[in-house]
Each structure stands twice: as C-alpha cells, then as structure tokens.
C-alpha cells in the first residue's frame, strides 16, 4: 500500500508539473503572438484556454512527450549497454560513443523543446482571436520605413500610381 501511494503521489506530481510547463508555454506564446505586456492577464486567459480546449491544447504535447520518452529510453538503453562494457582495457572509442549519445540526447531535447513552442504557437493561432487594435497607419500616406503624412479632410496629400 505504501509503494502504491508513493507511485500515485509521484504520478500526480509529474502530471501537475507537465500541466504547469504546458501552461507556461502557452502563456509565453500568447504574450508573443498578441504582443501584450500583461503576463498575469495572459496567464489567466491561458488557464481558460486549457480548461475550455483540453484535447486541442494538450494533445500535441502528449505526442511530443511520447516521442521524447521513446528517444530517452532508446538512448538510455544504448548508453547503459556501453557503460557496462567499460573496464580497464576500454579504449577511447567507447568513451566517445557515450559522449555522442549524450550529445544526441541533448540535441533531441532541444529540438523537441522547439517543437513544443511551435505546437503551442499553432494551437494559439487557431484558438485565440487576434486583438482588435486600430491600425495606426490607416489614415496616413507614405512608404514603409519612410515619412508618414496624416490625411485629414482638409489635406491636399494624394497618392499617384
């Protein structure tokens, strides 16, 4: 019973940590995509997004987690097999192979981290409507990056094509 309780406690801890990390990823992408400054408001809105759309928001992260766990399992099994063969007569090749496996694991983790942000950005674009902001250049004439001239009713500015 004590072992089962410990496993349940560890599982709940892992699940809550995964949800917290997913919430952080979605909050950061919401801040970036909407170009807002209120992290508190973006975080609260993201909680609402996760509660309203749990399958659409968490499914990509579950797939990436399964891929990550599979890669870690395969790389760990290979590293353990190489590690068991280390002895006094072991050459540098085994050590370089262990180093290469470690670097492959770091590379995979970095790529999967980027994939998490990409997935969060795509889901956020699909589910969160853009903010309705007025276009500051709507009533102006001028090329991009150059001077902008306001257009009013009495102005005589014109655009020739």
Image (tube, rainbow, N blue to C red):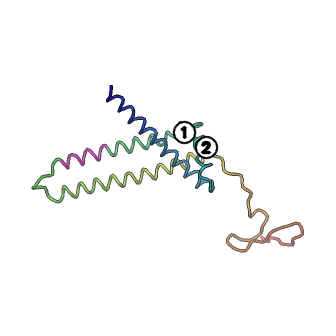
Q: Position of residue 120 (x, y in %)?
A: 53, 47
Give the extent of the magenta segment.
73-83
Q: What residue occupies the far front of the structure in this picture?
A: 2
Residue sticking out furthest to the bottom: 147
- Report the residue at 31% width, 30% height from top: 3
Q: Which mark is residue 56?
A: 1
| CB within 8 Å, label 2 to label 1 | yes
Quarter containing the N terminus: top left
Q: Residue at x 68, y 51 (%)?
A: 131
Separation of marks 2 and 1 at Cα, in angstroms: 9 Å
Residue 161, placed above or below residue 2: below
- Residue 103 left/right relative to 122: left
For the stretch drawn in magenta, the main secondary structure is helix
Q: Quadrant of residue 161?
A: bottom right
Circle 1 SS class? helix
Determine whether, in the image, residue 81 is placed left or right of residue 26: left
Is 111 situated above or below 73?
below
Answer few, some or many: residues within 10 Å of disc 2's Cα (few below 14, many 20 plus, some between 14 and 19).
few
Q: Where is residue 73 shown, x and y percent of the image?
A: 31, 43
Choose top left, top right, bottom left or bottom right for residue 36.
bottom right
x then y, percent, for residue 136: 74, 62
Number of the label disc, if any, that sits on residue 127 = 2
């Amino acid at each position: 019973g004590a072992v089962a309780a410990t496993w349940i406690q560890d599982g709940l801890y892992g699940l809550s940590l995964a949800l917290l990390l997913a919430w952080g990823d979605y909050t950061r992408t919401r801040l970036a995509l909407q170009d807002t400054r209120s992290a508190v408001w973006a975080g609260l809105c993201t909680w609402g997004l996760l509660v309203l759309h749990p399958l659409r928001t968490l499914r990509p992260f579950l797939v990436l987690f399964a891929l990550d766990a599979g890669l870690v399992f395969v790389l760990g099994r290979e590293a353990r097999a190489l590690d068991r063969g280390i002895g006094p007569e072991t050459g540098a090749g085994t050590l370089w192979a262990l180093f290469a496996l470690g670097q492959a694991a770091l590379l995979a983790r970095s790529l999967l981290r980027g994939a998490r942000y990409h997935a969060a950005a795509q889901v956020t674009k699909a589910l969160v409507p853009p903010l309705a902001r007025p276009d500051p250049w709507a009533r102006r004439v001028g090329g991009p990056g150059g001077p902008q001239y306001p257009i009013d009713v009495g102005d005589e500015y014109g655009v020739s094509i």
